[in-house]
Amino acid sequence: MINPFEILETINMIDKENLDIRTITMGISLKDCANPDIDTACEKIYKKITEKAKNLVAVGCDIENQYGIPIINKRISITPIANIVDALAEKTTENCVKIARTLDKAAKAVGVNFIGGYSALVHKAMTEGEAALIESIPEALATTDIVCSSVNVGTTKAGINMDAVLKMGEIIRHTAEKTADKNGFGCAKLVVFMNAVEDNPFMAGAFHGEGEGECVINVGVSGPGVVKCALEKVKGEPFGVVAETIKKTAFKITRMGELVAQEASKRLGVPFGIVDLSLAPTPAVGDSVAYILEEMGLEKCGTHGTTAALALLNDAVKKGGVMASSYVGGLSGAFIPVSEDAGMISAAKCGALALSKLEAMTCVCSVGLDMIAIPGDTPAETISAIIADEAAIGMINTKTTAVRIIPAIGKNIGDTVEFGGLLGTAPIMEVSKYSSAEFVKRGGRIPAPLQALKN
């Protein structure tokens, strides 16, 4: 039974602690849009997206106004476009880019913030269409505004496709060069996954997975500021109290997310999928995962003890969430994107947080290395090796990991790049000066680990 105190508490979370619904994401299957003819395929894609999502933004705004809950983004995820390219008679990069521009046009027509699913799943090998789509990513992201792309290069069951890992290092560099006039913004719309999930509502990695239905509503909730404020009330208490406090807070946040998801589902006539309880930070002061870790007693995020604090946070968030909803999914946990988190930015600027420490933190966080800017002259092979390291963490730990990294062309250590909005500011972080080229060029597939053999 909800009592007046809980209602007032939630109002306070929204008003003073940056609690919001980060996104309502509509997943749309484009399987029936596949066609050998590129013009026919694009026409069907545009028509389906604009018909299915025509009321998405209006419904989101209505719910926001009715309940007083900020809904920051309305988004669309779609079937991995490589599947559509595979059906084309001519599987060219030009045709892939034509589809990307169609997606951009359709998404703008319905008024959403982003559309995700310009994607390929190549954890074992690539089809002709998948290879063409990956090759087209730099041009596609440079010539569209709100299209997001992702590539899955491995799974715990399959191992790591190192040919794809090598290729994605080159693609990220080319994308940075193509969008150098926008500080490499194309790379902010591109993520490389290990163990990608099919119901993730967050960008840039959202796509409508093979196991999903015709259409679905997934909601992403966020509340780092709420968790930090809750921990301020238990300063100096043992870790058991800290964990319980986070669990109770996550429970309340998830309840709010499910309310919005169910309401959006009902009004749109689309099935409810999952609530993604990810503590997704913003550059706003107080809305920071780093500040939560520092509230636990760390002088600065990145110092010794940071990984342990993040592990406690991630686990407690999930425990609280699953008690609140039977359908918690996506990437639920704590995100650690550098440019989008005021505390992470501060820690990186003062030298407390290095790339090596961030990699260690990804062993226990929700995803991986996220929104990290590196020197513009970083070799493609080094980027590939960073991806390989993250993929290995995901493979061995049977978890989703990812890399969203931005080579800032013309910039070096000590510089920063500005993206604005939720994407924030990224200080340029140092990478190793030693080469990994010979390693990543071996090619082939790193075999699946022993724990993959569970049948």
Image: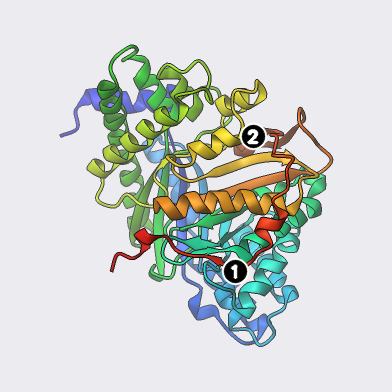
Residue type marked 1? Gly
Separation (CA) of disc 1 from disc 2: 37 Å
Q: Nearer the viewer, residue 212 or 385?
A: 385
Numbered badge on residue 424: 2
* 434 up-or-down from 35: above or below: above
The structure residue drawn at horizontal position 53% and vertical position 19%, both measured from the top left corner, is: 300
The structure residue drawn at horizontal position 49% and vertical position 80%, both measured from the top left corner, is: 32
Q: Position of residue 27 (x, y in %)?
A: 45, 62
Q: Position of residue 268 (x, y in %)?
A: 39, 59
Numbered badge on residue 444: 1
Q: Are marks 1 and 2 in contact (CB under 8 Å)?
A: no
User: Is residue 90 rendered to the left or right of residue 122?
Assistant: right
- Residue 57 visible somewhere in the drawing: no
Disc 1 element: loop
The structure residue drawn at horizontal position 44% and vertical position 43%, both measured from the top left corner, is: 366
Q: Position of residue 77 (x, y in %)?
A: 51, 60
The image shows a total of numbered marks equal to 2
